[in-house]
Every structure is written in C-alpha cells, then in structure tokens.
C-alpha cells in the first residue's frame, strides 16, 4: 500500500539522523519528513521553547492526525489521478468526478443523509458562514431573527454579529452550569420572524452533547430552520439528520482523522432549505460553493467518514476507558480538580479540567511536554478566560486554570499515564508556591477575605 511506501521513506529519513530524539510515548513520533525546528541531542527548540522530544499529543479537538487508511486513499489523486473533477471532456476529469461523488456518498452515509444533500466546502467555518448568513440573506424579506447560544464556536458568533450589523436580531441563549441549553428558554425565544436556530452538537471546548432531537422537535413545531455545527460530532457520536431534524449541518475533515482544508455542508432537500451563496464563481456544487474541488482532500474526507463508520463503536469504548484512566489518575493524587461541563451528556474524548489554586498560563507552560490547550484553537491566542467557561458560570480564576485534554483513536495508555504524571507534578509545584493554597489548607475561606485596595 501507499502508506507502506511512505513509512519506508520515513524510516530511511530517521536512520539518516542518529541524533534524533523522539518522545517514547508520542503519537507524533512519525512526524513530517522535514520539520521546521532545531533538533539536537539535547532536545528540540521551537518558538523559544526547549523540550526533550516531540510532546505527547492530547489536543484532538484542535485537529486529529490523518488515519493511514485515509492517506492511502488520497495519494493516488496527487500522483496519477490528478484531473480536474469539473473537466467533462476526458478520462482524467471523469475519474476525479467519480471519486468526488463516491466521497459524497461516504460522507452522507455517516449522517444518514442523501448524497445529493452534501455540498463540499473548505471546512466547518465556511459551512457555518454559508448556513447562517446564507439562510438569513435568502429569507430576509420575512425572517429577521436568529437564535444561537453563548457557547458556540467563534465563527458562528462572529457570523451572527455580522448579521446584527446588517440589521438582523440575534438572541444569544445562556446555558446551564453543565453547558446544556434550557429547552424552555429556546422555545420562548422563538418569534414569528425567527429564520434560524443554530446550536452546536458537541462543544469544542467542553465536549457537552446538546439534546439535538429535542431541539429539532421544537424547531419543527415552529417551522424554524435548524442548523448545527457538528464538526466535533462527526464520527464521534451517532449522527442522524432525520432524527435530529436539522436543516443544515456543518462538517469538518480534519476533526475526523481526515485532511485539513476540506469540509462539508448538509442541506436538507425535503423540506428544501435555501441559502444565498457567499462566493461567486463557476457555479460548482450547485452554485452554493463555487471553486474547483480539491479532489485529494475530498477523497480523504470521504475515506475518513467511511473509516469512522466502522470504527466508531470501538473508538468510543477505548477512548472512554482512557478518559476514566486520565480523570481517576489525576483525582487520585490532586484535590481541587473540577470537570467543566456535564459528565452525563459528554463526548468521552474531551475532558476539560480546572485546577484550583494554580495560575493557568504557568500550568500550560509547565506542561510543554504534553500538547494540550486551554480552549478552542481558534481563540487560544487570547489571554482572556474562555468565554465558554464564563457562560457556564465558572469563576474567572478557575476559568483561567482550565486545560482541555483531547483523547483520540491513536492515543496510547502510556501517553495517558505520562500526562497524568506531568500534570500532577506541575500542579503540585505551582501549589507549593501559592499562598492561597496554604491558606486553604489551614481552613481559611478565601472568599471571606476582604482585600485592601491600594
């Protein structure tokens, strides 16, 4: 297979570098052939940070590694089957077009949809923009109102703010302390001119799974189009567009062990949902998303969806055991550890923890041997506490200390054990330097202290 050839090339590359040190537990050991960082026998230096080897990868919500079976499916369309899928006059175009349509069927099958309802895009961000702006622009004569939640992905919130600047009304529903939507608040927010409700299926920061069927029933009852960002749900939990009664669904390739740069948009045909295209061009994808489709990426997303349909049940059992191993390992050795978001309605591969009495940025920097994040990759450059956690009512100091551990298909038990060891060591180190932690151990209620203002 092609992946065996790739693996052979990788081995040859590694044997030419006897000084290369890789983290013994890292899922990222098989890295790119050319790596933009300085490697020495003393470790790796990148962006001024020095570490002993490639970190453990526990940030699967940010992106997932490409499954080797997906790479096998993609490579021929880079090397020999490179035709433009929109070229209708010769064999190269025909075989690429066939591959696109096969991928369309693979994506549709994973969400119980028709292939005719799948539109390929560059990713979930584009799909969200088409859904939110496209629907309201198309129905603008009658529909002026959108409902969403305060914990949506930034691209959904920014799309809604864009609509507000154009004169549309947006209701941002609060969530409960467990991260779930109050269905009665959703029902009461619907107006006669509500054109769309947009609720994320699985939250990217805290992993909570919203009651999609119940939300779909409410939207159907009032005749409101229902959109969901399902980037974190695809291939992780069962998705059925009819059971959920969604009108539009945004999907991403690189969150399901496929390539970056490709996504999809599900658009219901019966009853038909219409959107105003957000891009003008050659009219590809029924005019909804113009531009030449990147055949290798689309093929990769289709293959990733087919692999997910076969592996989902096994992945869920295995990842659930690893999540418990991680949570129990940390809680057995540390107090003051809080799980953010519902544990009952949660995707098992997402574990968002806050550690009391530590400074969040110091904790994250101290865990440089573990690739984790403090929230969404799209907002991680901000030093502000996560807006998702603040929406749950998490106090600012605890929101600042949150770490999102992302567990995936290729995560090993040894990686979990090492992550537990490093997290415990760093939290204990920071607490040893914290006067607040000392006061807590002495039985002083810190919240009762009145601090002098100078």
Image (spheres, helix red, strand yellow):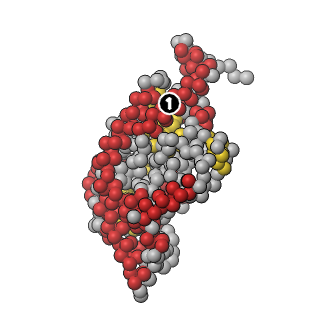
Q: Is residue 176 left or right of residue 218?
A: right
Q: Is residue 411 left or right of residue 355?
A: left
Tell me if residue 374 can be seen. no
In the image, residue 25 sits, relative to residue 4, either above or below, namely above
In the image, residue 357 sits, relative to residue 389, either above or below, namely above
Q: Residue at x 34, y 70 (%)?
A: 102
Q: Secondary structure at mark 1?
A: helix
Q: Is residue 344 left or right of residue 25?
A: left
Toward which corner of the image does residue 407 lie, by quadrant? top left
**How many numbered circles are shown?**
1
Picture coordinates of residue 40, whole percent (x, y): 66, 46
Q: Residue at x 41, y 47 (%)?
A: 410
Q: Residue furthest left?
A: 243
From the image, which quarter does the C terminus lie in? top right
Q: Which residue is mark 1?
A: 421
From the image, which quarter does the N terminus lie in? bottom left
* Closer to the camera in the image, 346 or 78: 78
Picture coordinates of residue 22, whole percent (x, y): 55, 45
Q: Residue furthest top?
A: 442
Picture coordinates of residue 228, whole percent (x, y): 39, 54
Q: Residue furthest bottom?
A: 89
* Closer to the camera in the image, 85 or 210: 85
Q: Residue at x 53, y 58 (%)?
A: 12
Toward which corner of the image does residue 5 lie, by quadrant? bottom left
* Closer to the camera in the image, 203 or 172: 203
Q: Residue at x 45, y 56 (%)?
A: 66
Picture coordinates of residue 297, whole percent (x, y): 45, 66
In the image, residue 437 sits, relative to residue 348, either above or below, namely above
């Amino acid at each position: 297979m092609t992946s065996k050839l790739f693996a052979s090339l990788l081995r040859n590359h590694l044997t030419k570098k006897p000084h290369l040190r890789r983290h013994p537990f890292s899922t990222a050991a098989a890295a790119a052939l050319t790596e933009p960082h300085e490697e020495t026998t003393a470790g790796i230096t990148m962006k001024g940070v020095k570490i002993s080897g490639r970190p453990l990868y526990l940030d699967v919500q940010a992106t997932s590694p490409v499954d080797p079976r997906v790479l096998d499916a993609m490579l021929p369309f880079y090397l020999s089957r490179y035709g433009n899928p929109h070229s209708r006059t010769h064999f190269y175009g025909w075989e690429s077009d066939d591959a696109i349509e096969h991928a369309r069927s693979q994506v549709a099958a994973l969400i119980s949809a028709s292939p005719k309802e799948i539109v390929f895009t560059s990713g979930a961000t584009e799909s969200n923009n088409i859904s939110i702006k496209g629907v309201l622009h198309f129905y603008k004569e009658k529909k002026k109102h959108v409902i969403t939640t305060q914990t949506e992905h930034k691209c959904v919130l920014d799309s809604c703010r864009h609509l507000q600047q154009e004169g549309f009304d947006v209701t941002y529903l609060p969530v409960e302390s467990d991260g779930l939507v109050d269905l009665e608040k959703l029902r009461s927010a619907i107006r006669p001119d509500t054109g769309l409700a947009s609720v994320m299926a699985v939250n990217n920061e805290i992993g909570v799974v919203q009651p999609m069927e119940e939300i779909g029933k409410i939207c159907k009852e009032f005749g409101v189009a229902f959109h969901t960002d399902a980037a974190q749900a695809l291939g992780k939990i069962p998705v059925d567009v009819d059971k959920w009664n969604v009108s539009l669904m945004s999907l991403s390739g690189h969150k399901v062990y496929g390539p970056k740069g490709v996504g999809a948009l599900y658009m219901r045909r019966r009853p038909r949902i219409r959107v105003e295209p957000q891009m003008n061009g050659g009219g590809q994808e029924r005019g909804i998303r113009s531009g030449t489709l990147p055949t290798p990426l689309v093929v990769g997303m289709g293959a990733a969806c087919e692999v997910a349909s076969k592996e989902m049940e096994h992945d869920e059992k295995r990842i659930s055991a690893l999540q418990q191993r991680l949570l129990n390992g940390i809680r057995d050795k540390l107090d003051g550890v809080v799980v953010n978001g519902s544990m009952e309605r949660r995707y098992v591969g997402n574990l968002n923890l806050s550690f009391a009495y530590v400074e969040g940025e110091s904790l994250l920097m101290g865990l440089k041997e573990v690739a984790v994040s403090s929230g969404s990759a799209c907002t991680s450059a901000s030093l502000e506490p996560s807006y998702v956690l603040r929406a749950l009512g998490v106090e600012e100091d605890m929101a600042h200390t949150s770490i999102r551990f992302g567990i995936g298909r290729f995560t090993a038990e040894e990686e979990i054990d090492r992550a537990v060891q490093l997290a415990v060591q760093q939290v204990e180190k920071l607490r040893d330097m914290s006067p607040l932690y000392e006061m807590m151990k002495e039985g002083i209620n810190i919240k009762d202290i009145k601090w002098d203002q100078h």
